[in-house]
Image (cartoon, rainbow, N blue to C red):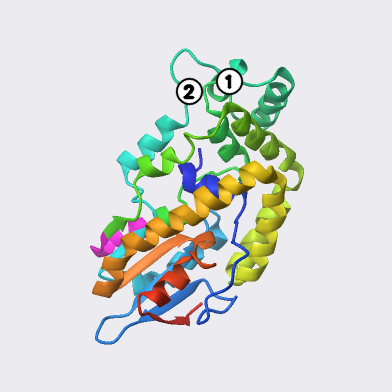
Amino acid sequence: MANGPPHFVLALVLALLPAAWPAAASQHGMVFECRQPGLAPSYLMGTMHTSDARVLAVADAAESRLRGARRLVLETVPDGASLAATMRAGFLPEGQSLDGLLEPGLLERVLEVARARGLPPPVVLRMRPWALATTLSLPPDETGLFLDLRLYHLAQEAGVEVVGLETAQEQLALFEGLTTGEQATLLAQALEIQPRLPQEFDDMVAAYLAGDLAMLQRLSERQQAELGDGLGAWFQGTLIEARNRRMAERLQPAIAAGGAFVAVGALHLTGETGLLASLERMGCALSVLR
């Protein structure tokens, strides 16, 4: 499973809300500086939750600013306990199996695709549908060193405090409201995109590396439409807007103290509830660094 729920968000789509862009932020940029009178500058970095080497290079480019920060602020702290909790949550309770939840035709297709990815049927049959959709919606991950984890390791090496805006339990709770049918829909969509997955992922990476937020928005809107009205509303309202508000509220003390390096998924940067707009409301003068 690819780093749990936050990566499931990316796996579905990089859904950037079609709301107004913050006045001080352009539609290009992935690393922003926040300046406030009398405080050390803070930084906001959009991330892609992937171990792709092209994306990991962004962490290396930002390393000097991270090492000089007072604290690193991530969506959640990717320590051993959080990763283990996420892994456990991706499996069905004892006595339950995927073959008792999915229609035979869908299950057959799932097993076929999973087998081609090197996932043995006994493991697949124990996974929750949303967790399996996570795994199948991203290219195979050989290292597990996703960008957020790379930043976490850099901070540890530099002795920089690391804090999370959410807990693993809060993130996992986002999926508890999904019915089995809705999870099956997510899984069916993950199967549907398999032929075009490499190209769509490369398109996302290219837009991310270019700092092209507008292109990411177009890519995400196209994919989000495939979820249907119900799941699309859940995605936007629960996974994006509600989390944006929660993260912005919890981010305030770190920004007020100055010297923060904030790294969250790129989908959380833009829109009226996005963190760029929230930083402006906190008094930040924003400028694009990358």
Which quadrant of the view contains residue 222?
bottom right
Residue 156 makes an appearance in the image: no
Q: Is residue 230 left or right of residue 154?
A: right
Give the distance between the C-alpha atoms of the residues marked 2 and 1, in whole angstroms: 8 Å
N-terminal of the pair, mark 2 or mark 1, is 2
Residue drawn at point x = 60 percent, y = 75 percent: 27
Q: Residue at x 38, y 73 (%)?
A: 43
**215 versus 225 height, above or below:** below
Residue 178 in picture, x, y percent from top left: 54, 34
Q: Mark 1 Cα within 10 Å, few/some/many (few <14, many 20+)?
A: some
Kind of residue indicated by mark 1: Leu
**Magenta residue check for 284:** no
Taking the spot 70% from the left edge, 47% from the top edge, the residue there is 197
Disc 2 marks a residue whose amino acid type is Leu
Q: Which mark is residue 98?
A: 1
Tell me where residue 278 appears, x and y as whole percent: 42, 70
- Of residues 113 and 273, the one nearer the viewer is 273
Residue 149: percent from the left, percent from the top? Answer: 40, 53
- Asked whether, in this view, residue 248 is left or right of residue 116, the answer is left
Contact, mark 2 vs mark 1 (Cβ under 8 Å) = yes
Residue at 72 percent across and 26 percent down: it is 109
Q: Does the magenta stretch mainly form a helix, a strand or a loop?
A: helix
Q: Which residue is mark 2?
A: 92
| Residue 8 falls in image quadrant | top right
Give neighbour class at mark 2: few <14, some 14-19, many 20+ (Cα, 10 Å).
some
Give x and y (percent) for residue 247: 38, 58
Residue 118's disc is none
| Depth order, front residue of 68/14 | 14
Does residue 264 appear in the picture of this structure? Answer: yes
Circle 1: element type: helix
The magenta stretch is 150-161
Tell me the SS state at disc 2: loop
